[in-house]
Amino acid sequence: MYPELRLMIDACDKGVPGDVEGQDPKTVGTRGWNVLREDLPLPVAVLKQPALEHNRRWMQAFQQHAGVQLAPHGKTTMSPQLFEQQLADGAWAITVATPHQLQVARQFGYPRVLLANQLVGRNAIEYVFNQLAAAPEFEFYCLVDSIAAVEQLVRVAQRIRPSRPIYVLVEMGYEGGRTGCRSLGDGLDVARAVAAHPEAVRLCGVEGFEGLIRCPSSAETTATVESFLGTITALARACEAEGLLASNPILLSAGGSAFFDLVVKVFAAAGLSRPTLTVLRSGCYLTHDSLMYTRAFEHMKARTPEVAALDTGLMPAIEVWAYVQSRPESRLAIAGLGKRDVSYDELPVPLAWFRPGGGSDQPSALPMGHRTLRLNDQHCYLGVPPDSPLAVGDLVSFGISHPCLTFDKWRVLHIVAADYTVVESVRTYF
């Protein structure tokens, strides 16, 4: 589905050898590159194929068990090649967050896109209406959380007289949170404003994002998330009672990558008389991570036994490799990666090391006592024990936290087999 020329990689892409010109990333496997054999310039970001395949199977099993659909958030990877895998697994749609991300999705021909955000501004609104007119198969959904946002959509529609309306979901929020209506009354007012202009907008459901809710304890967080999700279903019931909803089934959407089990639980008890379609928007499940989402998944398994029963759970698939380039002090090593290469809302964790020509064909786990102290733009300060085996020229793999903020630092990532041979590369479009 993706345009071939836009996918090409070359030596201007970080992590790609200097002799590459116009290489199709899908055929990179024919080159036989191997990370451990030093065929690639470091730092380099890799996606471990066995873990990717495992995570895809796990999410499919979870969806089937829960009876829900998935619209994975494309902002995580912004990689059409990975979107293709998710759609092949049965994804209902691709989710995006900005007009640029929407444009990428349309350039690559995806027929159903959910903008999990408000559609604001003349250029973006006109673009959507023009896409709806040009492609009868295109379905587009976005959020509204104010009468002002509805009025913006309506004003553009009245001027250009679109062939089809935009599908919208009213967004519920919470005090101190991000976007979203702060009360049931506000949500109903927005829904009524939508229903008053069916030629421009159609109300298809209710939405919210619970992923940023954090409380002092896990139990408090769970209770608060469930309470917030309850406001989504309460608004859906109120909209149904007033006949404001134009779609059948009614869409209920939430579910980042930390609490999608709670979304399934609360939405299953929505109490609507018409059929509902629960759409999760988890994006980070595909690669998972070594810190934030690993912890979140452990909490998920503890509170939802059905999740724990589904195989071994999600596995970290993304790593960034770098050379040790200096051992200036006995308790310090400097590795060649930094804030331009990895997310740093939580510091990366050193996982394993490998010495080229050292007699092994696989990396070894780093002994206890190795940890990331801080990052500069291009340097990582590693605290190490005095007897650390690390020497200049050794390779170190790092696990990351929050995949979204590592992917956006790479135009090319390499998918590797268990032995770190590159089988394919993927492009991103941030």
Image (spheres, rainbow, N blue to C red):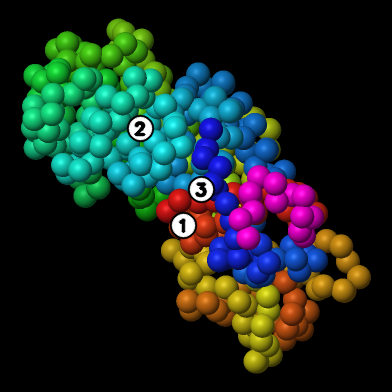
278 relative to 6, above or below: above
Q: Position of residue 202 (x, y in %)?
A: 21, 20
Q: Earlier in the sequence, mark 2 or mark 3?
A: 3
Looking at this rendering, what residue extends furthest in the right direction? 359
Is residue 28 within the magenta segment?
yes
- Residue 408's label in the rendered image is 1
Task: Give whichever of 192, 10 is nearer the camera.
Answer: 10
Q: Please report whichever mark, 1 or 3, sits nearer to the chain's N-terminal start.
A: 3
Q: Which portion, as a residue range, is magenta?
A: 21-34
Instruction: Give the quarter of the image for residue 122.
Output: top left
For label 3, the residue is 6
Q: Nearer the viewer, residue 349 or 114?
A: 114
What's the distance in space between the residues labelled 1 and 3, CA to CA? 17 Å
The answer to which image quadrant residue 93 occupies is top left
> Which three-letter amino acid code belongs to the residue tagged 3?
Arg
Would residue 387 be found to the left or right of residue 147 on screen? right
Q: Residue furthest bottom?
A: 329
Label 3 residue SS? helix
Residue 110, how many percent across, how many down? 44, 31
Is 9 within the magenta?
no
- The correct choice, above or below, for 162 with respect to 276 in the image is below
Which residue is at the front of the view, 274 or 370? 274
Q: CA distance from mark 1 to mark 2?
A: 20 Å
Rendered residue at 87%/74% (across/down): 357
Q: Nearer the viewer, mark 1 or mark 3?
A: 3
Looking at the image, can residue 222 be seen? Answer: no
Q: Is residue 180 left or right of residue 248?
A: left
- Crowding at dot 2, Cα within 10 Å, few <14 / some 14-19 / many 20+, comes out as many
Q: State how many labels appear.
A: 3
Foreground mark, 2 or 3, reads 3
**In this figure, which residue is indicated by the disc labeled 2?**
114
What is the three-letter code of the residue carrying label 2? Leu
